[in-house]
Image (tube, rainbow, N blue to C red):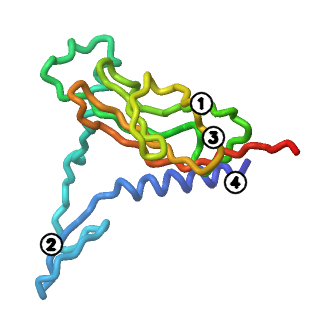
Amino acid sequence: MEIRTILVLLGLLVAGIAVADTWMWTDDEGVVHYSDRPQPGAELIVLDEPNTSQSLSTRSRSTSSNADAEPADDTAGPIRYDSLEVASPGAEETLWNIEGVLNVSLSLNPALQPGHQVRIYFDGTPQMVAGTSFQLQNVYRGVHNLQAEVLDETGTMMIRSRTNRFYVQQSTVR
């Protein structure tokens, strides 16, 4: 119990140091000095609130979740996707005996917006798919690559995933 008390007091001491005043002065040789202790001729530096900002996507999400917020302005910028990755099959994963059917799952944040489409590249061949979970047919034994991208209404690519390499193995019966 005594150790907790000491740790709490130590924490309060450190917190007090962190918010200490800062003093600035220039010595006889013209060198500017800073300290947490006042010196003869030193000037107290008053720091304003720190400059902070939120990214546009964070701001739009935080205001849309607030029930008391005013309706969103129609002139707001286009949606931006934060991340897109192939969740399944995993990178460097080995799949056994899938009988030619590959289940694919993509992780997209935020969710796919109305009017946007997903295009995948399976072994370099592009094809449009419906949504972020789908099946690919005729996926047989070997090394395969899978990459996904989201296109907006005009067909402009908005985000692209990394390429996932995975392996399909088939057991043989003798």
Q: Earlier in the sequence, mark 4 or mark 3?
A: 4
Callout 2 amino acid: Gly
Callout 4 amino acid: Ile
Work out how far the residue at label 4 is from the one at label 3, CA to CA, in angstroms: 63 Å
Task: State left or right for residue 148 relative to residue 26.
Answer: right
Work out how far the residue at label 4 is from the one at label 1, CA to CA, in angstroms: 55 Å
Residue 88 picture location, percent across and down? 58, 37
Residue 46 picture location, percent across and down? 19, 54
Badge nearest the viewer, 4 or 3 = 3
Q: Earlier in the sequence, mark 2 or mark 3?
A: 2
Q: Which residue is mark 1?
A: 103
Q: Earlier in the sequence, mark 4 or mark 1?
A: 4
Q: Which residue is mark 3?
A: 140
| Residue occupying the point 59% across, 43% down | 90
Q: Are marks 1 and 2 in contact (CB under 8 Å)?
A: no
Q: Nearer the viewer, residue 117 or 11?
A: 117
Work out how far the residue at label 1 is from the one at label 2, CA to CA, in angstroms: 73 Å
Secondary structure under tag 1 reads strand
Badge nearest the viewer, 4 or 2 = 4
Q: Which residue is mark 4?
A: 3
The dot on residue 41 is 2
Callout 1 amino acid: Asn
